[in-house]
Image: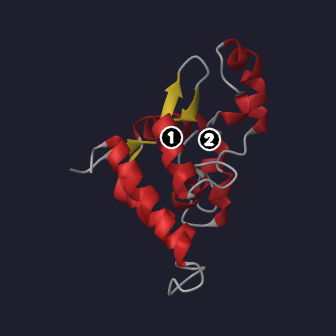
Amino acid sequence: MDKMIKIFNYIPELDAFDVTPEYKEIADTLGLSEWNPVVWIGRLFTMDNDYGEHWFDNWTERDAIETKARKLGYDENLLYVIDPTRFKDNVDGACHSNQERALFWTDVLKNLALDFDTLVVFATKCNYPSRYPDGSKNPDHIINFKKKVEELRKKYDTF
């Protein structure tokens, strides 16, 4: 059975997102988190380049909701706010207004879910093939990674 892991929770009172606890645990456990757990996803959304790692560099937007976020029990530093200007490149357009892009990306992120096995593929790439192509440099790391994957499979009892 395939298990789709929801990536974000939408917080309508803030028009912002945080990552789901399930995805955060998977990302942290399998090494998908860099400075935040969705950097790698942003790269794919932005034509598979490093500009995407900055898709949520939106400090001004976070500052604007800081007080309200804290009143609601959120740490604004862990929230993701869509800045629609980050989703255009001005090379051949823009084709849509900021409002249209914000609506579109809000809907996309509200519904974004990735298969657990997809997460494992990307985590595997992050964890050892490029560092240990033949596994000989640190076989314990590889064994531990595989154990973590199986523990998560059992925990969520869906695979």
Q: Secondary structure at mark 1?
A: helix
Would residue 83 appear left or right of 124 to someone viewing this image? right
Q: Mark 1, residues whose alpha carbon is within 10 Å: few (<14), some, or many (≥20)?
A: some
Q: Is residue 115 visible?
A: no
Q: Three-letter amino acid code at disc 2?
A: Pro
Residue 139 is labelled as none
Q: Residue at x 76, y 16 (%)?
A: 67
User: Residue 113, image x and y in percent?
Assistant: 39, 45
Q: Mark 2, residues whose alpha carbon is within 10 Å: few (<14), some, or many (≥20)?
A: some
Residue designated by label 1: 105
| Closer to us: 29 or 2 | 29
Would residue 53 appear left or right of 154 to someone viewing this image? right
Residue 84 is labelled as 2
Q: Three-letter amino acid code at disc 1?
A: Trp
Q: Sequence-wise, which precedes: disc 1 or disc 2?
A: 2
Q: Which residue occupies the extreme left position in the image? A: 1
Here the colouring is secondary structure
Q: Secondary structure at mark 2?
A: helix
| Closer to us: 157 or 17 | 157
User: Residue 131, image x and y in percent?
Assistant: 60, 79
Q: Relative to 65, does residue 42 appear above or below in the rendering?
A: below
Q: Residue at x 49, y 64 (%)?
A: 145
User: Residue 18, image x and y in percent?
Assistant: 57, 33
The number of discs equals 2
Q: Which residue occupies the extreme top position in the image? A: 71
Q: Relative to 6, does residue 54 appear above or below in the rendering?
A: below
User: Residue 52, image x and y in percent?
Assistant: 62, 57
| Closer to us: 107 or 137 | 137
Q: Are marks 1 and 2 in contact (CB under 8 Å)?
A: yes
